Amino acid sequence: MSVPDSAFQSRAVRALTLLHEDALRDFLPVWRAAREANVALPETTDEPYRSLEHLLVHVLECAGWYLTSLAEHLTLPRPALPPLPEPAQAAGNAEMYVDALLPVWRRTLQSVRNADLEPEVTLPGLPSWLGALLEHAAMHPQRHAFQLRELIRAQAPPHPRPAPHLPTEFRTARLLLRAPRPDDAQAQVDAVNASLPELRRWMVWAQEPQTLEGARENLAQAAEAYARRENLRLLVWNAAGTELLGSTGYHSLDWRVPKGEIGYWIATAHTGHGYAQEVAEFLTNYALTDLGFRRVEIRCDARNARSARIPRALDYTLDARLVNDDVAADEPARLRDTLIFSRTR
């Protein structure tokens, strides 16, 4: 039977026990991601690091060792640990082992008081104290998870890049789509601030008026992201390029698939003319043909009926309605649902 949080005599012991639980459980999916990615551990003669399976057993074994050491120094009954799986069976039994071990941690430490953690101890030749040992137990799986994440990133194959000569300007039947520049700041400030009453409902970034300085910085960052192909924002202009009508582009890019998400907003003075649909149709076709996207998404607040009409008109499929997916842009205390539409190839 699991021990409730309220049964602990010490808030510090409770906090560190729960931190250890979270850290040990969080380690497992990171380890599985490393295994799926065929991560190679650095060469070493240390037995626990011979393979990913040996590392998994090491982390599980240490979780029991820390508890046994704490119990010994606190003169508590020796905890009854579950059988430790062998490396060959560890992957299939790790969750079961953790589920059996963590209640033992709670039962063993629930009666420990703050004062019990103060005596100094010597752990393999190193002076320490029991509170530090408990902290180290919580940190141990976090350290190995951190190292595995670094190895996953370091050994991941390089992401393929889009065509090196991706244009910075596109034209539709009525519009000019152009990559952002810092000198577009005044036009953006005017369009955004005049449209705040409508944008606030849907855009987190539109809760306060934009300043000229803030717009310049925002556009400079957007231009750099476009050049690096990390985020492809495009400003929507009239055909002559003299009036800013809104903004669009490809976001949440993953060039490994490749895939991306199309976003858009049109200034209030220019809504009702079909510009958003014209932009979304062009970007959808360009993504699936010229950029070779395998998946294009459009996401919106489920209450935003005008925005949701566009992917439906463009033959997108409604993949999901994520209930309570986020907080409302204009009312963070209220939850909102998110609609996810997609076109695939």
Image (spheres, helix red, strand yellow):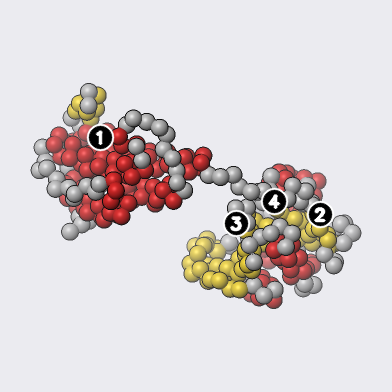
Q: Secondary structure at mark 2?
A: strand
- The residue closer to the viewer here, 334 or 87, is 87
Residue drawn 79% across the image and 52% down it: 167
Amino acid at the residue labelled 3: Val
Q: Tell me, yes or no, if residue 104 can be seen here.
A: no
Q: Are marks 2 and 4 in contact (CB under 8 Å)?
A: no
Which one is in front, 195 or 103? 103
Q: Is residue 331 above or below residue 84?
A: below
What residue is shown with label 1? 133
At 30% from the left and 34% from the top, the residue drawn is 47
- The amino acid type found where label 4 is placed reads Pro
How far apart in space, not on screen, are marks 1 and 2 (Cα)? Answer: 60 Å
Query: Where does the image place residue 157, in percent across and percent down from the top left?
Result: 56, 45
User: Which amino acid type is marked by label 2?
Assistant: Glu
Q: Residues within 10 Å of mark 3 (few under 14, many from 20)?
A: few
Residue at disc 3, secondary structure = loop
Rendered image quadrant of residue 127: top left
* Element marked by disc 1: helix
- First of labels 2, 3 by sequence position: 2
Residue annotated with mark 2: 169
Mark 1 or 2 closer to N-term? 1
Q: Is residue 28 left or right of residue 17?
A: right
On the question of residue 343 being in view, the answer is: yes
Residue to which mark 4 is pinned: 162
Q: Does the residue at mark 3 contact the one at mark 4 (Cβ under 8 Å)?
A: no
Amino acid on which the number 1 mark rests in the picture: Leu
